[in-house]
Amino acid sequence: MLSNLLVCLLFLTCANSLHFFDQQNFEHRKNVLFIVVDDLRPTLGCYDNPVVITPNIDQLASKSIKFQRTYVQQAVCGPSRTSFLTSRRPDTTRLYNFGSYWRKAAGNFTTLPQYFKDNGYFTVSVGKVFHPGRSSGFTDDYPYSWSIPPYHPPTEKYKMAKVCPGADGKLHMNIICPVDVNSQPEHSLPDIQSTEYAIQFLKERALNKSKQPFFLAVGYHKPHIPLKYPKSYLDLYPFSEIKLPKDHNYPPGFPAVAWNPLLDLQRREDVAKLNVSFPFGPLPDHFQKLIIQSYYAATSYTDGQIGQLLASLDKNGFADNTIISIIGDHGWVLGEHQAWSKFSNFEEAVRVPFIMHIPGLTSKTFAPGLNFPFLDSFKFFNKSQTLKESLNIKSNRLRGNEYSTNESHDALNAVSHKQIESEFAMPFIKNTQFVSNVFVELVDLFPTYAELVGLPLPELCPRNSSLIKVCTEGVSLVKVIKETLKSPNVPNSVSRNWKKATFSQYPRPSDFPQMDSLLPHLKAIKIMGYSMRTNDYRYTEWVGFNHTSFTPVWENLHATELYSFNSSDYNRAIDPKYASLVRELSKKLHAGWRAALPQNIY
């Protein structure tokens, strides 16, 4: 059924697009696989995390350029996705919650997939790419952005359902939700269904031998709450080995306006019955560890889905001509600072992983089936041992090894014990050839992808861009990529002169947390927290906000934050010794993102 539906959609759309599609001009352009993972922070093996098991993402990273310092413009799904898909910041899209559609509220802005579609690409959305609902026109921006109607997995409708088995033998709507997939409605989970659909698309694409390049966007839901995943993944993370973060207490001097109360968690039955104090908590230590354990497990589950998708892309012959990227739509605070979730300007909420694979540039390409063999997380882990013991086991590396087509589905079977090189905790990390430490913002994705495939580079948006369909408030990273590939691990002039800071923001309705603090309606936004990340500091000002002009009122200062990344977790803005530094950073924050751009880039 799925196959027949997809074939029909492909046939109808291709027939309608032939009038503008010129095979001679487009057949040599690279495809794009654009993977977005909901609530994914850089808690991955390839980002030096010693615990979380993500062999498939790590394998991709070993053949990619990894950006260490990537930041979102607002740490919540709808505004962040609208921002990076239009390459414009929240004050331009005028979206700070889920309550408006940028085409009606801000301007008829062209999106990243729309730009590719308008230039001859076949564009497909699978899973959560745009935030569904009002913020994407109730259509995921179809038909503007997509060649066929976006696919949403049917089991996503059980997101708020009582499907989590409890110790009492009943089903609950919990945040912690390891499940037997076969006992779930439709015997599946959303991300499994999204992977199946995307794989079917790739199979049909290979079978039809279409020369039209594709832009395939796949959005995975986990590790977004509820943390619902196959229960076997808990075996990877024994509870006795789970640790709380070092800085898990409320930061000294932290202003109440900056706090995100636990409202999204407290809607879940298992959190609600804890009767946690509003708005600061904290959650009991035992329950904090349960959340951390399930976040790790859900991340490994998503890694497995990504591994299957990459293996299919490879098997169907697309690995040698497809640019692949993985990003998080924002981060997730995992107990640091006594906080949880997103909805804030915490470093953990706004920093995300960003990995980009460019075939032939970031790695060599091999015969189909040999580029991204699927890696089973469970074959990296011995259930008879504790996690600590397993972390000392050496794991197999893939680089430099060859596999037969029959073995490519299980890379571990093809690697001899003599080729063991790295610790289990960090497979492939030491083989990550290309790492960039420049500041990256997700608004940079649009111009970067356009330049990589040879499309016209969008110009920098003017201050008022409401009538301009195509422009960017970011900057292409191609110069950084070229210099990094040319001189790996060596600082170069491009990197030294790149962005001086990144910029994020978050709205609040009041100085003290209240029931609408997480997602205030536009008219209720009284305060905006504008946050800037520099090499050494995170500096934030919570100031008055004009919700009709979408502008800050800088002179109406409610609170200030200053954190150093070289010392303890406390707000230095309240310390008179840092008054001169606060004044200096305040000027830079007020000057804004334009003043922090690389010189002579446009």
Image (tube, rainbow, N blue to C red):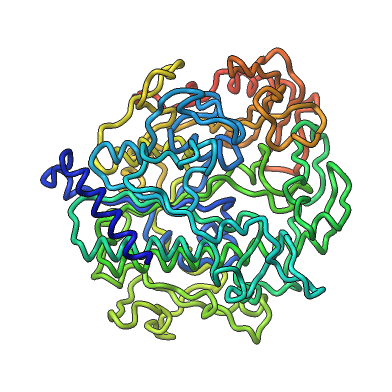
User: Which residue occupies 59% across, 36% down?
Assistant: 98
Left or right, residue 444 beside residue 132: left
In the rendered view, would you say 404 is above or below 517? below
Residue 285 or residue 499, whichever sits in front: 285
Residue at far top of view:
555
Residue 473 or residue 532, whichever sits in front: 473
Measured as percent of width and height from the top left, residue 132 is found at 52, 44
User: Which residue occupies 67% across, 59% down?
Assistant: 161
Residue 407 or residue 489, whichever sits in front: 407
User: Which residue occupies 75% across, 34% down?
Assistant: 516
> Based on the displayed image, in which of its 4 quarters is residue 160 positioned?
bottom right
Left or right, residue 326 beside residue 21: right
Taking the image as drawn, is residue 58 in sight?
no
Measured as percent of width and height from the top left, residue 473 is found at 44, 27
Taking the image as drawn, is residue 154 in sight?
yes
User: Which residue occupies 18% across, 61% down?
Assistant: 209
Measured as percent of width and height from the top left, residue 184 is found at 61, 70
> Based on the displayed image, in which of its 4 quarters is residue 183 positioned?
bottom right
Left or right, residue 54 beside residue 312: right
Measured as percent of width and height from the top left, residue 570 is found at 78, 39
